[in-house]
Amino acid sequence: MSYLLSATCAVPAAGAVLTAALPAGTTEARRRTTKTVALAVSVLTLGLAAAVAASFEPGGARYQLTESHSWIRSFGISFSLGADGIGTALVLLTAVLVPLVMLAGWHDATGPVSGSAAGSVPEGSFESKRRTQAFFALILAVEAMVLVSFLATDVFVFYVFFEAMLIPMYFLIGGFGDRAGGPDSDRQRSYAAVKFLLYNLLGGLVMLAAVIGLYVVAADQGQATFSLTALTDAISSGKLVIDPNAQRALFLGFFFAFAVKAPMWPLHTWLPNAMGESTAGTAVLITAVVDKVGTFAMLRFCLGLFPDASKTFAPVIMVLALVGIVYGALVAIGQKDIKRLVAYASISHFGFIILGVFAMTSQGQSGATLYMVNHGISTAAWMLVAGFLISRRGSRLIADYGGVQKVAPVLAGTFLIGGLATLSLPGMAPFVSEFLVLVGTFSRYPAIGVVATFGIVLAALYALLLYQRTMTGPVKAGVEGVKDLKARELAVVAPLVALTLLLGVYPKPLTDMVNPAVNDTLSQVHRTDPAPAHPVAATNGGEQK
Amino acid sequence: MNSLIPLLVAAPLAGAALLLLGGRALDRFGHWIATALAALSFAFGLALFADMLGRDAEHRAVTEQLYSWIPVDGFQADVAFQLDQLSITFVLLITGVGTLIHLYSVGYMAHDERRRRFFAYLNLFLAAMLVLVLADNYLLLYVGWEGVGLASFLLIGFWQHKPSAATAAKKAFIVNRVGDMGLSIAIMLMFVEFGSFAFQPVFATAGDASEGKLTAIGLMLLLAACGKSAQVPLQSWLGDAMEGPTPVSALIHAATMVTAGVYLIVRSGAIFNLAPDAQTAVVVVGAVTLLFGAVVGCAKDDIKKALAGSTMSQIGYMIMAAGLGPIGYAFAIMHLVTHGFFKAGMFLGAGSVMHGMNDEVNMRHYGGLRKYMPVTFATFGLGYLAIIGFPGLSGFFSKDKIIEAAFAKGGTEGWILGLCALLGAAVTAFYMTRVMVLTFFGEKRWQPDAEGNDPHPHESPKSMTVPMVVLAFGSVFAGGLFVYGNSFLHWLEPVTGHAEGDSPLSPWTVTGLATACMLAGAALAWQMYGRSPVPVKPPVGSLLTRAARRDLLQDDFNHAVLVRPGTALAATLVWFDSRGLDGFVNGLAAAIGGISARLRRIQTGYVRTYALSMFGGTLVLVASTLLMRSV
């Protein structure tokens, strides 16, 4: 048994404890030590994640590097982990983003308040001397829990970590804002944090009922286990037959929790508050990492455990996802706040991901998985640059900006690249995934595919309107002093831009990793791709490589 | 030799990357790097052309497979290039005219502090445009298609401190995205129908599909073409795109990018040939746009906008020819190439005039410039003669062929199209003569600028005039060269196919009619603008003139039908999201809060009460578990 997966999860967990235990940040030097330790831990985690990806064999078993440690034997619960292609891709995404989020938020817990209105806060006047420790420890804690969620092959273990990550997220949202929200911002922030918590707790409670229900049903047929692999095997071999009504109820229980987390329209209203009020780095953690657990879990748990119910509900879910695509984009167009705009854009994108998952075609699901990764990278770039801008001017309002490209061309350029990635420009990674999702949807549901295509026009509108209003035109009062990106900030953006381009022109390593897991999922739900009406001759041209 | 094909793209792409990442160190000579790389790409193109000429017609097409791009089960997208007679024609046009315009820009942009970035974008454009014409499948074509859209966006908005430029750039991108939707859906339709979207397999299998499906694919491709080539109803962005620096207007918005729609339709000929309804839609769009653009061109006082209307109209000719099927494919491309020469030349001429006139664009403030800018006058004049179809010059041959082909369509349709094309020829002669006369003839009408300085019109530097002279040569001779022995037709025939059609009129009759139309249009313009003084303030004008000045109300229409309702919808949804959906959630939360406030009274603090409630809860759990098991 290999311990690579548990090490990958344990390192950030231990790092969180270590970071929290470091001496209080009363001096700049101590704070820097704390931050450096946390960053080093996250880089080490990235190394481990890379090792996982490197040892993953696309042609091998679905779950690799598996390990299992017995936990609550009487209920058949064991701490078991396993990496499949989809999980590994998301583990990599998480491990890449966390160090960048830390670097981007280097001063978010301690730095002087930017902007003319707030002025700078004198040293030592923070609520707590342990803010820096708390901020970085919480990020590592979230990372550890997210990683377990992507790797868990035990339903109960997944549930526990799926829920537990709410706690550090709650404190990250409620405790650390971008200080650009105006006089009311403390109240707004705690409202956002509580809203986030309540929404997701509600989803989690419903899921808990379904998790217990699943166990009861399975135990009833002699399969007293929470092991995902054992359960899915029993289901596909017919040893475990869940009554259709029970299956639908259990599916909805799981799906509700994931739809809140993703979030899917109309359960999305916590996201704009949470992303708007927290720091840009936290917003990235929410939308690019934590939310992905929701869409990921739809693919792994809903489809794997309840194949028939998934097929029953697929059309309804597709329509809700479609509404989310158009609705999210239209509401984004009408936003006045930069970060809320990004949040609504994400809601539109989550619609695409869910569309790809439930289209149940190989293009749709491979596309959805790639979409999770690519959306993570591109939104991180877009949001973090927006965060850099907001920290300089001390305002989130679009109307407070104008002509930034004149004073900070590199910042404006990277912001444009983030926006272009968000609108899925061909040549950049999101195009690959978006087109796969569209084609995979279209081949089974042509009408939904066509309407979803309108999303590409709307995405261009919100992304380019935001660019035009903030970056072009004459330099607005208050923007003159905006400085261009610093070395630390460039170090955050450069890898994201490079990945966006690389995965746009050469996504093959990722698709090779993801495809087998997608095929396995499709065979679990007994779905095959629709065959072309008039397939081209196999010998024709070079496309049959 | 085939390994040169990727290098065609790589050279300008490397230039763009180098110039964008290189920083200020490259400010002093970066533009020369970009120009050299464009020229290098042209040299590769010439080498490949020579190589292709060495093979017989059947063996000229080659493919170069680079790597598997997006491999997903059942879905195969490759980065693979296809070089045939059609694509090499474009390669030479793009890199040739592109190199000349790089050279021109060295002088034109000499005083711009962001010149390095301008050249980076120009190189990026060349790379994307080459991907567009070299791709061997529709998805890779899509990359080039939106890549040129990006370059166009960056270059229209190059002076982005001007709000009008930034707005125009965004507008161009958004309108093009509507067209791109068409391309997306076309590719999806092909995938569902054929399981592939690579040119050769799809074209070979197209015959198996139903006409309905092929018509749908054709119409979606047409939508894409309308966006990129500024055809009605997606034409509204092109006039505003003139906010970009003039070399950009010459290269992207006249000679190359805007003709991509024509390429798309001609390339997809195998599909259109089997979908007559889609072809009818193509010719209708082409015919409508050729008149629309021409009418707009008559009313504009801004020299670049007049030329933009003309571009729209000339591409209308090409689209119409492409919609005629094998009768017109080769002639659409032939007019595309000659138009590339004379329109790029005239735009560069317009840029030269603006350069000498302190960036004045209003032709009513020009007049008599032939004395001050002899080279510009001569080259622009040759382009003018070419576009109106003066006998012997390029446009005469290429436009004539299209008018002939329109009549050759046969039947009532042929008559309608042919007459539209003839009417277009007359209007073209009118608006181009108007531009020529207002700019170079008559009294000088320029006025001192705000500081009271006279503009002192002067000829432009060599780096600008040399490209204009080269393009003028093309404007004069290319057409004759192409029709001599039908060389151009024979060159493209293996790719596009050719059919003669059935014309009710003899070629000489058509030529005679076209020439008569041209003379009538030119004479009318001379009468109106050459023989009486031109007022500096534009007269009120007829209803049609006023509508044409507003681009035949295209923006008013789009605003009323799309922008305003769309903005209102977005605002309504924002309200609904915060008041409706979130209001519901908050109301729920408040209700729960109210209930829990009451429930709080149960929390007495006595351990026995809690114990009792725990006991009750356990009972319920156990009972329900037992109940479920027994079911």
Image (cartoon, coloured by chain):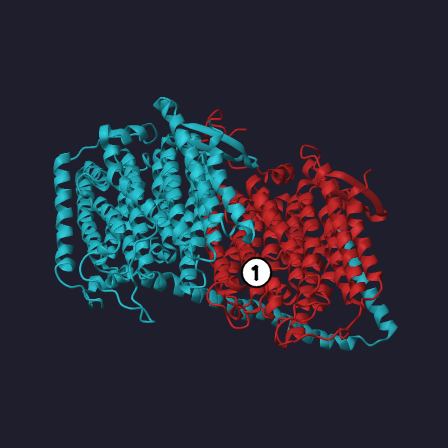
Chain colours: A red, B cyan
Residue closest to the far top: B56
Residue B356, picture quadrant: bottom left
* Residue B536 drawn above or below residue A58: below
Q: In which quarter of the image is the C terminus of chain A?
A: top right
Residue closest to the far right: B607
Q: How many labels does the image show?
A: 1
- Which of B215 and B375 lies nearest the eye of the viewer? B375
Q: Indicate the secondary structure of the residue bearing disc 1.
A: helix
Is residue B392 found left or right of B563 in the rendered image? Answer: left
Say which chain tag 1 marks. Answer: A
Is residue B453 found left or right of B29 in the rendered image? Answer: left
Expressed as whole percent of the image width and height from the top left, the position of residue A529 reads: 54, 37
Residue B630 visible in the current orientation: no
Expressed as whole percent of the image width and height from the top left, the position of residue A472 reads: 48, 63
Q: Which residue is drawn at 28% across and 28% down?
A: B490
Per the image, the residue denoted by label 1 is A342
Residue B549 visible in the current orientation: yes
Expressed as whole percent of the image width and height from the top left, the position of residue A31 reads: 78, 64
Disc 1 residue type (three-letter): Val
Mark 1 Cα shell of 10 Å, populated few (<14), some (14-19), many (≥20): many
Q: In which quarter of the image is the N terminus of chain A?
A: top right
- Which of B445 and A357 lies nearest the eye of the viewer? B445
